[in-house]
Image (spheres, rainbow, N blue to C red):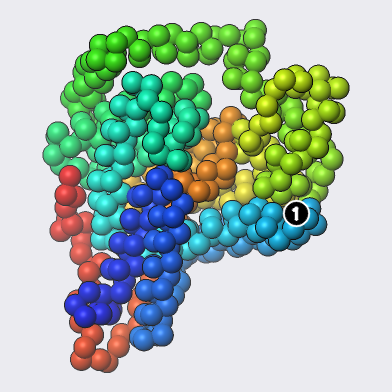
Amino acid sequence: MIKKIAGFNYESLALFAFALATSFTVLGPVFHYTGWGIALLALIYGKIKYNANLFGAVDKSSKCILGILLLYLVWSMFANAFTAGSFYYWGKSASVPLELLISITLAIRLLNKEAGRRKFAIVFLTINTLIVIGLIIIEAFNIVSPLHGLLNQNIIGLYSVIVMPVFFCTAFWFCKNSLCRVLLLSVSSLLIITSFSSGPLLTATLQGIIIIFYAIREKHLDFKLLTKCFVVLLISLIGLNFISGDKVLPRFKQEFEQIFAINDTDSFTSKRNRAWSATFFMIKQRPILGHGRALFNKRYDDNLQAFIKNDIVKADEIIYAHPHSMYLGSLFDSGVLGLVLILLAFIFSIRKAWILLHRSCTKKEIVPWAVLGLSLLVGQLLYGIIGDIFESRNDIAPIFWAFWGILLSLSININDDGLTHTPVQQDEDITKETSCDYSPVQIQSRC
């Protein structure tokens, strides 16, 4: 049952607060912290007032994954307690897995039914389509980004591979309007292209292959749509290059030269190889407990002379902000066990998505969400070689965590929708209207 608060139910408040928090988080952490807080308060109100469920129900596979993530949090808190040196650094390092769990838990509780997921997607797509278009203009014209969280191409590249699967799955499965579908496919592809970064381009290619494969299998792929999208992309690139005064094509040339500079490791990796070598040097000092990700700059500075002596970095090079790798970053943060736990969470989540997509009894309505989760998780395993989603905990990571939570809210069990069931209340003021019980046919995308 949905509980009404002066004509507006508390679950709707929590849902839209979470949707806005996830949608605007790329503009700064204040948005997702505020939204999460409002959502939690609304759910606590429901628990106190109506004894409603505070947490969402999940199947055994998701319980296992949540257990691994909880263990990851506990281990991170334990390991960082020995290395942080202060409560500030301990909290800054250990809070990353805590925020991951909060976002996933909220997503499981609030987005456990198709109606809620559709509403969330509409809010997210509306806001982020505008943000993506703005970023394309910023990148094409080489404008300094006014957005704190999107100050360089690496961050924009990560953002592009997080939102691309959302846009693609919506275009293939949910949108009926042809213009809207072309818009979603074109702008998300254009953002990846204009990020001028090979890592996101390779990641997006893999994600696209996964999504297109299942779109073909489910008979949701329209080749005319892809043709229209290609034409729009080509015209857009030519137009952007002309309007920007021939600034786009030279940057493509520069990126291709870097991709094929295999014999020049510094150029090929954008000097990430030096950050990787320096990080591995420090990991060997504390392979079990790690150092705590918040202390990377300090530990780097402490070891700088050793780096120079061992020809890892040059004397005039600046301190790197982070390891530029999810794998090395996890090892540096909480040691071998920390990396093993987060990889297990990824692998079991991918397995869950795979099972959902390859069982004949899987409900058709959850297929696109499983495809979305699979493409995002596999994409981050690839992108994690040259980037770290956890270093973007202030802006981009909450988007990834929310859609990860949606995947975990889906149930593998044929007779169990894996959803939260709110207790029935014998209260005249409680409306017996359940806004989340409509069929997917009734809930049409507003695209």
Residue 229 in sight: yes
- Going 74% across and 58% down the picture, which residue do you hit? 86
- Going 43% across and 70% down the picture, which residue do you hit? 40
Percent across and percent down for residue 131 are 31, 39
Question: Which quadrant is the C terminus positioned in?
Answer: top left
> In the image, what residue type sits under mark 1?
Ala
The residue wearing badge 1 is: 84
- Going 54% across and 58% down the picture, which residue do you hit? 99
Considering only vertical position in the picture, is 301 above or below 427?
above
* Side (left or right) of 34 relative to 6: right
Considering only vertical position in the picture, is 311 above or below 24?
above
Which is more toward the observer, 142 or 199? 142
Q: Dividing the picture into quarters, in which one does residue 310 lie? A: top right
Percent across and percent down for residue 49 are 36, 86
Q: Dividing the picture into quarters, in which one does residue 420 lie? A: bottom left
Percent across and percent down for residue 446 are 16, 49
Which is more toward the observer, 295 or 337? 295
